[in-house]
Image (tube, rainbow, N blue to C red):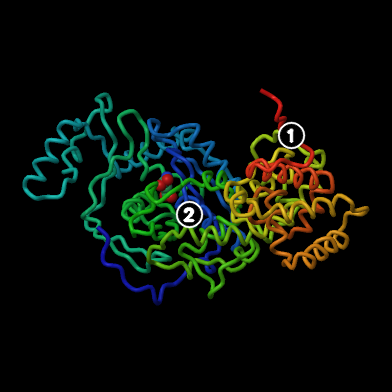
Amino acid sequence: MPAPFRPRSGITHLTSQTSSPIRVRFAPSPTGNLHLGGARTALFNFLFTRHHGGVFLLRIEDTDRERSTDEAIAAILDGMRWLDLTWDEGPIYQTSRLERYRQIAMDLLARGHAYRCSCTPDELEERRKEAQAKGLPPRYDGRCRDRQVSPDMPHVIRFRNPPDQTIAFSDLIRGPLSFDGNLLDDLVILRTDGMPTYNFAVVVDDADMKITHVIRGDDHINNTPRQIAIFRALGADIPSFAHLPMIFGSDRTKLSKRHGATSVMAYRDMGYLPHALANYLVRLGWSHKDQEIFSREELIEFFDLDHVGSSPSVFNPEKLLWLNAHYIKNASDPALAPLACELLPPLQDPLPQSSDPEYRAHAMGLLKGRARTLVELAESALPFLDRALTIDPAAREKALGKDSLSILEPLLTALGSLQEWNAETLKNVFTQIGEAQNRKLGDLAQPIRAALTGKTVSPGIFDVLILLGRDVSLARISAALSDVRKNIQIPSPETPPPRKDHP
Ligand code: GLU
């Protein structure tokens, strides 16, 4: 059990003093998608390495064959690539190193740091129950320690936990910690089927891969003393440890599906930009003065473990949305266009200009200021790409009622007779009609906006008219006008009145 944590003051941070190059690793177990907590761990490792000019290694801890899947491996790699967290070495799969773990286990066995244990799961369970009944901790009682179990019997290999050791280390986030080694039992390092256990494989790898800093979630903090004991037995250098505090949901319980999407790729599908998500994640625990928005270069320049707090942070989807809107607004128009257009439903009747990258980029420039996600951006771009237009019920109700006739009719006539279609000529038409009707530009724009975009909000009306061009604009205003007439059952002038003489 961890000793009570002491304050962080006075910790010596080893990073700048170590002579060997910084080497860190992200070591996910591929049992599911890359989730937000894992992505934050990967990001902190990445930034720490890049800040120090070190090496970032990706290791896939796939020794749990029942729970590891190829889909999860692919999802983790996709998530890392999408977040732009490039690694320098790997992916290294633990399953490709099984021979190495066996070899090290045999070496520990030969040097007396490990022993064979033939206790069966049933026996262990029985003894666990007995201990529990006596109110004792359910630990392995060391029965096979000195039994010389034959290698021909089914057995596991256990680590011989040294007696009377104190395991102390200075966590780079939590400060000095010390553990009573007598509380650790003799851990299984190799199972009956020859597979290594997590705590063993991780140490063999961290030692072989010369990892200098282990930065991981603090759900592993109780594994650290066990791992240090194994490092000692191997005679390997012990890395520095930094355990990141948890991420909570709004109810201050561990972030989980109950709080909404937790997988990184779900955020991609919901229209988040990778650098916006990374910027959000980095602030879950780390701070740099009161700055909220960081370029990747700034993150690499400023990131350090000294400013990672030791208390859990709370995931706030609203803030993430705000950051995403900021990143969208500041993204380049040509870069946004393919990202947003990828999220469009298939176009029913594409406008001829809709496939022109310059036109798409121009549309993004006009629309991006109002979009909080790429999904919203794509949705607002649809009227500019597809001839088929759906009018939102809210826009119909608000702007295309009976009153709109007196706006749509004269505007259609005046716009239809324009020789030139530009900001100046369009503005003149609206000014003249506004003055004649004693209406403000905003009042005139409402029904036109609804007719052109099907929505109650859009970029400036002249920008919309220019972007859509004369033909599409006039066709849409005319269609809206017919619609309004139909809805209020006023025959349009071109429709002949019903014949009275008909039976
Ligand atoms: N494979 C472990 C996990 O996914 C992480 C191991 C480590 O970072 O030491 O939780």
Of pointers 1 and 2, the one earlier in the residue sequence: 2
Rendered position, 361 above or below 106 = below
Q: Which residue in the structure is indicated by mark 1?
A: 349
Quarter residue 160 falls in: top left
Q: Secondary structure at mark 2?
A: helix
Q: Position of residue 347 (x, y in %)?
A: 70, 35
Q: Quadrant of the C terminus?
A: top right
Residue at the farthest front position: 501
Residue 203 visible, this orientation: no
Whether the residue under disc 1 has CB within 8 Å of ligand 1: no
Q: Label 2: which residue?
A: 41
Looking at the rendered structure, the kind of residue marked 2 is: Thr
Q: Is mark 2 within 8 Å of ligand 1?
A: yes
Observer-nearest residue: 411 or 242? 411
- Give the side of residue 492 with respect to residue 374, left or right: right
| SS of the residue under disc 1 | loop
Query: Please, is residue 487 above or below residue 210 in the view?
Result: above
